[in-house]
Amino acid sequence: MSPLLKLGYLIQLVVVQTLLVFIGLAPLPLVLAAADLGAVLSFTLWRSRRRTTIDNILKAGICADERGARRMALASFRSFTTLIAESIVGRRRLTASNWAHHVEMRLSPEAEALLRDPRRGLLVASAHIGNWEVAAHAVSMLKPITVAFRPFHNPYLEKAARKRRTGENLRYVSREEPNPMRFVESLTKGEIVALMIDQHVARGHVAVQFFGRPAWTTQILAMLHLTTRAPLLLAFALRTGPLRYEVRTVGPIERARTGDREKDVLALTQALTDEIEKVARAYPEQYMWGHRRWKGFPGQ
């Protein structure tokens, strides 16, 4: 690492840690006001991300015209900055004794039974909607969970972020870690393995339809389900008010096995993607539209 790059990374770390201290100590209304201001500023100044967000909303057919898509894009920016702020606040204020006052668990009987069975490993797909950080922390109150994530490029920021995000029953592991058996080991212990599946991936992927357009999606969860036979759920946390959330689940997701592994992986991944699309259609303002979801296909 060059000295200049290292200096840049350290400056980023100092800025982020300063913001974390402010968010952790300031009253919630002030934190949310600052988050809203951050959303408006980033929407105004970050032109490339704003354009991508608006284009994706139009491609998905969420809004019929540019004006409506622009309003929805700003709402999506606001949702994301609020997520960051409330995730930081939540790590300090949501505990094993009070989390149920902030998070309502709306689970099917099947999903609740799986979450409360300490012997049964469970696979959980999630998406960038609502507050996925709160969803992980809330679910970890019921069952230990390992979350696979994409690490930051800044190694100092990555180390600090992982330390803050990890809890007693919550462990974050990088997708880039070399041990391919780490998820199987977690499932064998009766834990949850969770993974966000609504972003473009360059390797280990399968092409699914998302809002009527082809999109590369990770096949890890489907492969694990077929290999281990662990139940497969979709879970997400919708924001219902200041530091208030509703965790919902879909599933278990099942598809008849055909004996053709590639076909079965595609069917399971498409089923999960279809459920994510339904949630994004129902709550588009809480979905993160700024990612280049359809990257890698002609005309996208």
Image (tube, rainbow, N blue to C red):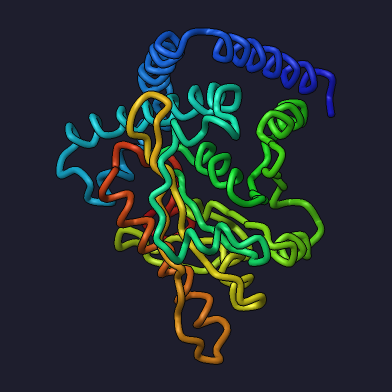
Locate residue 28, reporting x and y percent: 45, 14
**Looking at the image, which residue is at 34% across and 61% down?**
213
Can you see residue 172? yes
Q: Quadrant of residue 43?
A: top left
Task: Reply above or below: 152 against 121.
Answer: above
Farthest residue to the bottom: give it: 259
| Quadrant of the drawing holding the N terminus | top right
Q: Is residue 64 left or right of residue 124?
A: left
Q: Quadrant of residue 32?
A: top left
**Looking at the image, which residue is at 41% across and 69% down?**
271
Locate residue 227, reporting x and y percent: 66, 77
Locate residue 254, reporting x and y percent: 46, 76
Can you see residue 129? no
**Looking at the image, which residue is at 40% across and 11% down?**
29
Q: Is residue 38 left or right of residue 175?
A: left
Q: Quadrant of residue 297?
A: bottom left
Q: Is residue 104 left or right of residue 171?
A: left
Q: Nearer the viewer, residue 78 or 40?
A: 78
Task: Reply above or below: 151 against 203.
Answer: above
Locate residue 122, reporting x and y percent: 60, 63
Q: Nearer the viewer, residue 138 or 253?
A: 138
